[in-house]
């Protein structure tokens, strides 16, 4: 948490969980801009931005962030409930080839 990127990721995750999606997106983008070290952390940031952009009807951007999550961490997958979500699930399944 000493690094700005990790602190921004933490704040983004907290904001997301609190339903503050505009703040979450801002924190998560800052985390990515500040070069998160961990591939898993980069994938999480991209995943949450994908969720936010899909629910904001920014489908192309949602798809971009799901692809970026997979590029950051090739083992990236949504959980079964996440993949079954009616809004972002179809976008994720399309890019995952499922």
Image (cartoon, rainbow, N blue to C red):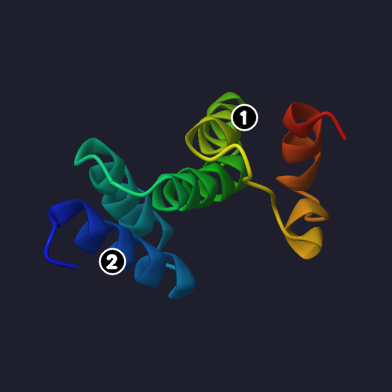
Q: Are marks 1 and 2 in contact (CB under 8 Å)?
A: no
**Where does the N terminus fall, quadrant-wise?**
bottom left
Report x, y in % for residue 35.
24, 40
As helix, strand or loop, the secondary structure at mark 1 comes to helix
**Label 2 crowd bin: few (<14), some (14–19), many (20+), radius 10 Å:** some
Q: Which mark is residue 11?
A: 2
- x%, y% of residue 77? 68, 48
Q: Is residue 78 left or right of residue 29?
A: right
> Residue 63's mark?
1
- The local crowd at label 1, few if under 14, some if 14 to 19, many if 20 or more residues have their Cα within 10 Å, is many
* Marker disc for residue 13: none
Residue 56 x/y as whole percent: 55, 43
Query: First in sequence: mark 1 or mark 2?
Result: 2
Q: Nearer the viewer, residue 17 or 42?
A: 42
Q: Is residue 18 above or below residue 88?
A: below
Which quarter of the rendered picture does the C terminus lie within? Answer: top right
Picture coordinates of residue 88 (x, y %)?
70, 45
Residue at left 52%, top 34%? 65
Quadrant in the picture for residue 82: bottom right
Instruction: Report, in whole angstroms, how far the alpha carbon at label 1 lies from the one at label 2.
Output: 23 Å
- Element class at badge 2: helix
Furthest-right residue in view? 98
Give the left or right position of residue 68, taking residue 33 as reference: right
- Looking at the picture, tell me which residue is in the foreground, 57 or 46: 46
Q: Is residue 35 left or right of residue 76?
A: left
Total numbered labels placed on residues in the image:
2
Q: Is residue 11 above or below residue 90?
A: below
Residue in view at x 78 percent, y 55 percent: 85
């Amino acid at each position: 948490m000493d690094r700005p990127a990790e602190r921004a990721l933490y704040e983004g995750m907290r904001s997301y969980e609190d339903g503050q999606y505009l703040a979450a997106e801002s924190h998560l983008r800052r985390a990515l801009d500040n070069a998160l070290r961990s591939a898993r952390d980069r994938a999480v940031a991209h995943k949450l931005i994908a969720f936010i952009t899909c629910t904001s009807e920014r489908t192309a951007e949602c798809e971009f962030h799901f692809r970026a999550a997979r590029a950051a961490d090739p083992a990236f997958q949504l959980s079964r409930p996440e993949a079954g979500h009616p809004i972002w699930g179809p976008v994720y399944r399309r890019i995952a080839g499922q």
